Amino acid sequence: MPSETTMSGDTGATVAAHDIARLADVGRAAVSNWRRRFTDFPEPVGGSSASPLYSLAEVEAWLTRHGKQFRLLPGDRVWQQVRGAVDDLALGELVGTLGAFLVFLRREPACWKRLSTEPDETLAERLPEMMASVLPDVPGTPVTRLDTGWVGVVRHVAEAAESAQTDGSAQTDGTQPGRELLEFLCNRYLQVHARRHAAVTSTQLAELMVELADVRGSVVLDPACGIGTLLIAAHDAGATRLGGQELDSVSARLAAARLLLHDSAVRVVAADSLRADAFADELADVVLCDPPFNERSWGYDDLVSDPRWAYGLPPRGEPELAWTQHCLARVKPGGWVLLTMPASVANRRAGRRIRANLLRTGALRAVISLPSAATGPVPPDLWVLRRPADTDPAPSRILLVDAVADLSVAGPAWRAFLAAEAAGAGSTGDGTAGDLPPSSTAVRVIDLLDDEVDVSPARHLHAAGRDAQAGKLQPVRAKLLSALAALPERLPELSTCDRAPTRSTTTVAELVKAGIVTLHQAPLKTRIDEGELPVLTAQDVLAGQPPSGRTVDVPGLVTVEAGDVVVPAGLREPVARVVTAAGAVLGPQLFLFRVDPERMDPYFLAGFLRAAQQQAASSRTSSVLARTDVRRTPVPRLPLAEQQRYGEAFRQLTVFSDVMRETTALADTLTRLSFNGLADGSVQPPPAD
């Protein structure tokens, strides 16, 4: 539906092409098409030739004039004002200030009503002082004069929050005015600074951590709280009081504002937890933490004699074990600690003494290997610890879970482990505990106290014969037999001729010039390991699989459409594919050719692109296809009907090639599972005659 009435002062807001596509719910190609077809499309008002910026008001008027359906929410308007007010370096400061202002607006609406009538210059002077007096629980609240350019953004934020309260949209789902707006701005900020905030805890992992800890009615502390994701999950799960500490002042301010807008009883401090612990005199019921990894300057020289190191002085290169002991020191006896750790901490030689002490005292209760999708490109482990109480007997077992393939197994495995302990199964001596899922096992602590003290789940699951992969042998065998049986049907019937026909040809470059084909590439330095947008990578094209990458929304991204032809730029194996499912973003090192379907068959083009790659590879000893200019690929001049006949043959050959690759992979998997299963006893040889 068309947008609501434009808010006053929007003339300074700008949008990029990808913003227009999102607001109008169309692909970026549609926006490019509008720019070419319509002479009255707004002219750029900033940006660069590669990434122009347009006036939001002019774009909104153009969309309305041409009957284009779009929806521009208050958050969109505010965000465009924010992006126009500061550069990327100051973006966090402004978003954090707006978060604090939303808390101020909620607490003192009458005060803001009086202040809002003041001129911008006066408001810039008085607002920080008023906010500082009202928001002692928001760290980093500005106490000096606001930048004059920020005042207009603050007014827009107030209008957006007040309009949500007036029309009731903020209350329909139980949220408070301003909360949804801050979440919107926070998400946009994280997308812009995705590299800086790559370690933001995923919602999926946060929910698992609060589930395992059972935080209902608890006091919860996060000593490395970031923007507050874990604390918000704890609040939603029923925690009664929250505490957070964060070194980065912008993140701490955002965390406090988000939590206060969630009606949380919370205290957030901006400081270094290891060097300047703000909660040294308090003990929580539960500590949740996703600490920074591989931080070498964590304070080793200053903290050598710190009393928190009850399990041993953390080595200089093991900051994660410093965080582990800090968390244990801040929880009550009998309280739970859940924190993420790099997988290497489970077996690094430098930390074996501390790991051994954690096991001997019963502090370390479980190690869960996490999937990369829940945590980022490099999957860590989740450690579950309990601060021993004086009267507690030391547990005899530790739970190890491999949840890399399926995070949902972690919860049932943990509950089964606790139930078995409560029933006394932990003292049976058989190395198991209760009815655990196949991808988990309970290992005796005494068996781990060797020279390595390795608590890696994968190692011990395989040794115990409980590797989740072992159960896949029979299904893989059945799938391989089915694939082998289908091979003859997949092979297309092609005839040969004594003499190849003479055909006039053109090149891909000439087709591009004629407008029959358009060529697209992803922006330079496109990330494929962070964000929410699915990305089609070069390896996906090679394997013929769905998009596996993830990226953030940045200017210049290319949305893949059905019928596009994609060709990797640097693989040694020739490949060119026709996309059948739209919606993903084009990844780096890929050429995308978009054909005019009324003049060219995409499978026809893909077939000749692949044939040219094969010929280039066979004529070069290096077989480096990156040097092949795909734009010089010769393409026969044929009528569309003839193209489609060739295209169908090329399509069938591609399917046959994919089936062959899958069959080979199945054979390799079956061989590996069989060898491993025979070795660990989970697979038996056929009976003797």
Image: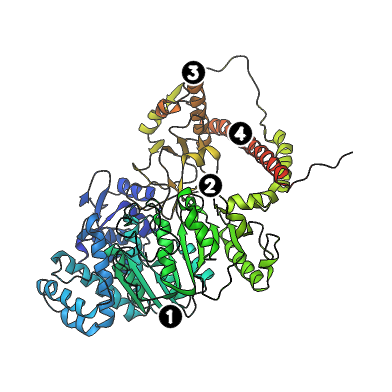
Say left or right for 641 vs 55: right
Name the residue located 64 percent from the left edge and 20 percent from the top edge.
Answer: 496
Q: List x then y, in percent, for residue 409.
A: 60, 61
Q: Earlier in the sequence, mark 2 or mark 3?
A: 2
Foreground disc of the pair 3, 1: 1
Q: Which mark is residue 546?
A: 2
Q: Residues within 10 Å of mark 1 (few under 14, many from 20)?
A: some
Residue linked to disc 4: 657
- The percent coordinates of residue 630 (x first, y second) are 42, 29
461 sits left or right of 93 in the view: right
Residue at 43% across, 25% down: 506
Q: Name the mark nearer the viewer: 1 or 2.
A: 1
Hey, what amino acid is under mark 1?
A: Thr
- Whichever of callouts 4 and 3 sits on the residue coming sooner in the sequence is 3
- Residue nearest the viewer, comparing 293 with 560: 293
Please rate how many residues cluster around mark 2, counting C-alpha atoms within 10 Å: few if below 14, some from 14 to 19, many from 20.
Answer: some
- Whether pointer 2 and pointer 4 mark residues with C-beta atoms closer than 8 Å, the reply is no
Q: Is residue 549 at all visible to an observer of this figure?
A: no
Q: Which mark is residue 678?
A: none
The residue at which mark 1 appears reads as 240
Give the secondary structure at mark 2: loop
- Name the residue type under label 4: Ser
Which label's residue is closer to the chain start, 3 or 1?
Answer: 1
**Distance between mark 2 and mark 3 Cα atoms:** 32 Å
Residue 320 image offset from top left, x and y in percent = 42, 57
Identify residue type, mark 2. Pro
Report the residue that reaches farthest toward the front. Answer: 305
Q: Residues within 10 Å of mark 4 (few under 14, many from 20)?
A: some
Give the residue at mark 3: 619
